[in-house]
Image (cartoon, grey):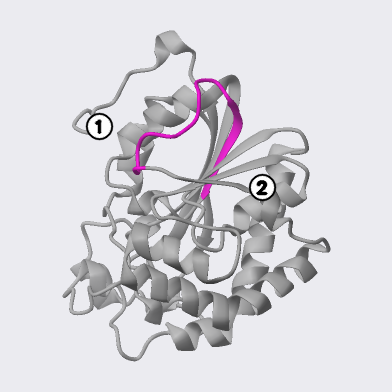
Amino acid sequence: MLHYGLTGYRDFAREHAAFYERLRADEGSLPGRQVLDVGCGKSYWLSLLIAADGAHAIGVDTELVENRRGLAKYRHILQANGVERTLRTAVWDMLFARGYYRELERSMGRRLPHQAVDLHVYDGVHLPLPDASVDLVVSHEVFEHISDVPAVLNELARVLRPDGRIYIYIHNFTSLSGGHHIAWKHPDTRPSRMVAPWDHLRARRHVDIPSWLNGLREHEYRAMFEKVFEIDEWRVTAEEGRALLTDDIRRELKRFSERELLSKGFLVRGRVRPTADIKILDGSDT
């Protein structure tokens, strides 16, 4: 992870800037809007770009995220999230953060207003926001880590205004990089020599990864989303791994379609269903 971070943080910043440019092109002007970033992460990059555009950015995460530096920050994170998360955050701050944010500013052509982001901790389901208070919900590669997706979707519907919208990108679990092993961070340009392609769907020899995954498939997500939201677009964003999908692997993974195996992720755009049409989900009703 250190190797990929040190060699790739500029690429990560450019990828993030490109995602945000697509968001603006798809969703229009953001200034003045209340925008919720679900799973903002320790770098809260999407919240930062939203705030830099003149919107009110609210970032929530299950772990404490602070937009400041200094010993007090690490003391707070230690108390809230434990030793491992504190060390991860300190390493990020010391080795990657400055260069990453500098590249992000260069890519976007504007300063990043760290202090303008409104950061909160939540329990993974219940959002610390009043009803009908948000214009737009955004999220990037977070929903694959959520254990109770139906409950979170119900919460999004609660906090969104009647004309509110969602813009959610989900990393596809069945994709080549969907197992979240760092060795497959760049599957087409730097394929792993250590971890077999689609190991997380096959032998599962390398399942020790830093973040839990719910393992949901695309059709399961879609069924959940469609019960709460009117879907305007369900967009497959990129393909990866075609050259590595051999006939032998295809036969071994015949329970998955080619689309499932090659689609890196999907973007969900939509709006809240009228209240009378919303069916409250309980996790088993999918």
Q: Residues within 10 Å of mark 1 (few under 14, many from 20)?
A: few
Number of on-image labels: 2
Q: Name the residue under label 2.
A: 23
- Quarter holding the N terminus is bottom left
Task: Tell me which residue sits at (39%, 48%) in the image.
Answer: 143
Q: Would you identify the image quadrant in which residue 96 lies? A: bottom right
Q: Name the residue under label 1.
A: 286
Left or right position of 76 against 6: left
Name the amino acid, label 2.
Leu
Q: Would you identify the image quadrant in which residue 21 lies? A: bottom right
What are the residue bounds of the magenta stretch?
123-139
Residue 17 visible? The answer is yes
Left or right position of 260 against 95: left
Give percent across and percent down for residue 116. Answer: 70, 48
Instruction: From this view, report whether residue 45 is shown above or below residue 7.
Output: above
Secondary element at tag 2: helix
Give percent across and percent down for residue 41. Answer: 49, 58
Task: Tell me which residue sits at (22%, 61%) in the image.
Answer: 254
Secondary element at tag 1: loop
Q: Would you identify the image quadrant in which residue 37 lies? A: top right
What type of secondary structure mainly makes up the magenta span? loop
Instruction: From this view, report whether residue 62 is shown above or below residue 206.
Output: above
Give percent across and percent down for residue 97. Answer: 60, 74
